Image: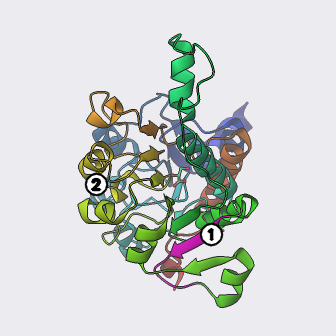
Amino acid sequence: MHTSVSNKISLPKVFLTRILPDIGMKMIHEIAEVEVWPERLPPPYEVLLEKVKGKDGLVCMLTDQIDAQLIEAAGGSLKVISQMAVGYDNINIAAMTAKGIPVGHTPGVLTDATADLTWALLMAAARRVVEADKEVRLGHWQTWEPTMLLGVNISGATLGIIGCGRIGQAVARRARGFNMRVLYHNRLRLPLELEQSLDIKYQDLDVLLKESDFITIHTSLTNDTYHLFSDVQFQMMKPTSILINTARGAIVDPEALRKALINGQIAGAALDVTTPEPIPTDSPLLGLDNIIITPHIGSASYQTRAQMAMMTASNLAAGLKGERLPHCVNPEVYA
Ligand code: DGY
């Protein structure tokens, strides 16, 4: 009894802003004295400021605001921040680096799950699956009709990928099964060999917007990509085109999207991410039939979330021991 108490006291202290999948919780309980926020909603910012005080490690989510003030509140003990997500636009990385705190994230393991959901949304929007299901439930299905709920073909269409990193490339790979012409736009052009093996073609953004039947967003949210899709971009798109966003909501200007959907500048949209999140239930976007919205579930498969939790725990464990994080956002802290 005595031994276990003294062992516990010597463990590093960590705060988790949410309960992780079991495997991650188990790993973290083995290495740390854990305080976990047990609610469904994230801890309010003021609470987070209190909770990080004196902690050695912080496990956070994309719903937490992690900034310079929070690091000050934590005091000098904080050694590592481990985020259970690949994206980290909620974290002020420069402020963490300035304090020498490594930030971990979970790249790679959610690539396929996110690409799968992108395709689920693309296909659902193309073939109006959500509207069709609603019609059946409302008792509107009376007979087979020659022009009922017509959608657009996916096979042979042109797919435009904005941001061709891991997830964009996984989306492109899936497009081969549909015999699509695939264009991409990226900050940096990919090596020719990779373009050839994926059978994708680099295009200027304007050309991609004009030529694509489906456009899917996989870039991260930065100052440069904030509202990348606004009035001008929608005006360039085909009136039959469909926009899919599984990256970050703020890349699309929601008011410009609403106008584009109402005015027929584009035919439809499918979003797994919105701004803000959650989208308010009185948002005008939710009143439109030609948009599908899911609640940021790109990585939400049992297997993927378990892998993300394990990676989060491994990053945390390394940081607590003062070792290099296996997946570090700001490796310059080790310079
Ligand atoms: C991420 O990891 O950044 C996704 O948005 C959620 O899994």
Distance from mark 1 CB to nearest ligand 1 atom below 8 Å: no
- The magenta segment is 180-189
Secondary element at image label 1? strand
Q: Residue furthest front?
A: 146
How packed is label 1: few (under 14 Cα within 10 Å), some, or many (20 or more)? some
Task: Confirm whether the magenta stretch covers residue 80.
Answer: no
Residue 288 coordinates in the image, percent (x, y): 35, 33
When the figure is inspected, residue 21 is found, relative to residue 226, above or below; the finding is above
Residue 3 coordinates in the image, percent (x, y): 73, 39
Residue 271 coordinates in the image, percent (x, y): 45, 45
Residue 233 coordinates in the image, percent (x, y): 31, 65
Residue 253's label in the rendered image is 2
Snapshot quadrant of residue 284:
top left
When the figure is inspected, residue 251 is found, relative to residue 153, above or below; the finding is below
Which residue shows up at 39% across the image and 63% down it?
Answer: 221
Q: CA distance from mark 1 to mark 2?
A: 27 Å
Give the position of the N terminus as an image quadrant. Answer: top right
| 287 lies left or right of 183 | left
Which residue shows up at 47% across the image and 34% down it?
Answer: 37
Could you say which is closer to the camera, residue 141 or residue 279? 141
Residue pointed to by mark 1: 181
Can residue 322 be seen here? The reply is no
Can residue 201 be seen here? The reply is yes
Decide: marks 1, 2 in contact (CB < 8 A)? no
Q: Residue furthest bottom?
A: 192
Residue 226's label in the rendered image is none
How packed is label 2: few (under 14 Cα within 10 Å), some, or many (20 or more)? some
| Callout 1 amino acid | Arg
